[in-house]
Amino acid sequence: MTAPALLLVEDLWIAYDRIQAVRGVSFAIAEGEIVTLIGANGAGKSSILRTLAGLQPAARGRVLFAGEDLLSLPAHLRTQRGLALVPEGRGIFGTLTVWENLRLAAYARRDAEMEADLERVFRLFPRLAERRHQLGGTLSGGEQQMLAVGRALMSRARLLLLDEPSMGLAPLLVREIFRVLLRLNLSGTTILLVEQNARLALEVAHRAYILETGEITLSGPAAALRRHPRVQAAYLGG
Ligand code: ATP
């Protein structure tokens, strides 16, 4: 990474009672990058995303977002600064329509650009446009994931935190979601991607960090990690 960091994480520790889930993790993301965090179940990936979003306190450490200390800001102010979490399980409102879900995600914003942003989301995800009056809970898994990403875009995300976007989706839908993520990245959105599907994550990311029981054990350009024997053995099926 040569550009200055948009997100800088230094010596981050996260604990649940006596469980040290994340132990001294440091990493950086430059503006415009796709960075992926790869690790087995329970390695601490979701905990890191939740702490960055302000949903889980850090036990120790420092996080700077565009130079500003993030850990002292409440979650809603982090959203205002341009940080958006697309949680595992998607977190959409099942009893609200697609349109209402998107409107609600932009509640903190002034209305002037709201319509333009809605149109942008509908252009990226034509399926959502077709289903704008359908209730969130009646969408397919893939459409719910699109809606979850759409919600993050409505908050004008500068950094998207994506937790397992491919989870439970058919391969065709996964490809569609990832195509949109790449388009978003090309238009300037920085992405931190947590994925079980390491193969896919290493295909789309510029750089990657491997997380094992709460610690980063390997990092580097995604293309180099794809060829790394340890990564191949542990995450790419040999
Ligand atoms: P997964 O892919 O299964 O979500 P992960 O890498 O995202 O795994 P985390 O969910 O961050 O891992 O969990 C890291 C560790 O913290 C695990 O040991 C987990 O059991 C523990 N943990 C996570 N959330 C809690 C919680 N709310 N209370 C207690 N322990 C938790």
Image (cartoon, rainbow, N blue to C red):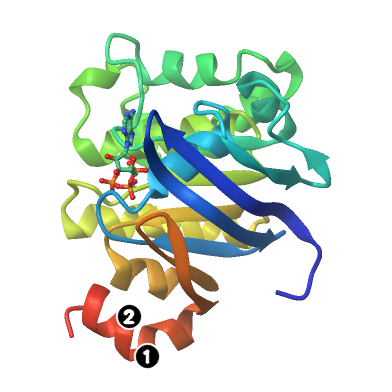
How much space separates mark 1 and mark 2, taking CA atoms?
Answer: 7 Å
Query: What is the secondary structure assignment of the residue under circle 2?
Result: helix
Q: Where residue 35 appears, x then y in whole percent? A: 54, 63
Question: Could you tell me which residue is drawn at 70 percent across and 22 percent down?
Answer: 77
Where in the figure is residue 115, as x and y percent of width and height? Answer: 63, 23
Q: Secondary structure at mark 1?
A: helix
Residue at the spot of label 1? 227
Asked if residue 184 can be seen in this view, the reply is no
Q: Position of residue 133 (x, y in %)?
A: 33, 16
Does the numbered disc 2 mark a residue whose Cβ is under 8 Å from ligand 1?
no
Kindly indicate the quadrant of the structure image that contains residue 100.
Answer: top left
Q: Percent from the top left, x then y, of residue 156?
A: 66, 34
Q: Amino acid at mark 1?
A: Arg
What residue is rendered at 73% in x and 27% in y?
A: 72
The residue to which callout 2 is attached is: 231
Is the residue marked by circle 1 packed among few (<14), some (14-19), or many (20+) residues within 10 Å? Answer: few
Q: Check the image and report above or below for 97 versus 82.
A: above
Could you tell me if the residues under marks 1 and 2 are in contact, i.e. CB atoms within 8 Å? yes
Q: Is residue 3 positioned above or below 119 on the image?
A: below
Q: Quadrant of ligand 1?
A: top left
Left or right: 142 with respect to 2? left
Q: Is residue 7 visible?
A: yes
- Give the residue at x 82% y 40%: 68
Given residues 173 and 1, the one toward you in this image is 1
Query: Residue 69, which numbered label?
Result: none
Side of 93 relative to 52 (left or right): left
Quarter of the N terminus within the rendering = bottom right
Outermost residue toward the top in this view: 95
